[in-house]
Image: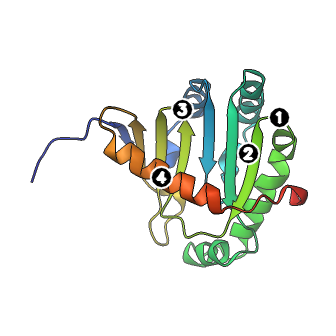
Amino acid sequence: MSASRPADITAVYPRRTAISQKGWLSFFEAAKNEIDILAYSALFLAEDARIVRLLSDKTEDGVRIRIVLGTPDGSNVMRRGAEEEIGEAMAAKVRNALTLLRPLVRRTRVDLRLHDTVLYNSIYRADDQLLVNQHAYGIPAAQSPVYHYRRTDPSEMFDSYLVSLEDIWSKGNPRMGDV
């Protein structure tokens, strides 16, 4: 067994809350072409007015933003709520995030889709960087590890997560009327 660390891993955080607001702002600020957000709710981002404003400003710079969140009444959002022992609160988090993101989603270059997929992780992308928030049974995403990847040559791990993100995006439901 090799003890070396893959070159595309930049950092590991013991939990999502270990990444400061400044860290999230810097991550998204670095994007020049595209930002992707794949999560059940991403409420922590939607509640942060500075991040939402930054995302809005990025669209003015020509950055494409894709957001794919869990279908609030979908079976997998309900299952995740049960697993985290918060029940209906998970669906409420998604609905709250959708409401808070409404002004952003109305902007040019911002697309939103809903998924009813079992997520094994949430993925946040800023061009050639990914923050991958692992999901562990019964543990809230905020308390779960995050891996920071940067595309390298080769980027086997980065590319695997990107394939997953693209697959879920392509299967997502563009329900803009609900937002």
Is the residue under label 2 in contact with that under label 3 (CB below 8 Å)? no
Secondary structure of the residue carrying numbered label 1: loop
On the image, numbered disc 1 is attached to which residue?
Answer: 108
Q: Is residue 144 left or right of residue 8?
A: right
Name the N-terminal-most of marks 3 and 4: 3
Which mark identifies residue 46?
A: 2
Name the N-terminal-most of marks 3 and 2: 2
Density class for disc 1 (Cα within 10 Å; few <14, some 14-19, many ≥20) is some
On the image, numbered disc 3 is attached to which residue?
Answer: 127
* Distance Cα–Cα, label 2 vs label 1: 18 Å
- Amino acid residing under circle 2: Ala
- Amino acid residing under circle 4: Val
Name the N-terminal-most of marks 1 and 4: 1
* Distance Cα–Cα, label 4 vs label 2: 25 Å
* Distance Cα–Cα, label 1 vs label 3: 18 Å
On the image, numbered disc 4 is attached to which residue?
Answer: 163
**Residue 149 position in % (x across, y down):** 40, 39
Name the N-terminal-most of marks 2 and 1: 2
Secondary structure of the residue carrying numbered label 4: helix
Is the residue under label 3 in contact with that under label 1 (CB below 8 Å)? no
Q: How is the image coloured?
A: rainbow
- Image height check: is 93 above or below 66? below
Q: Nearer the viewer, residue 56 or 159?
A: 159
- Amino acid residing under circle 1: Thr
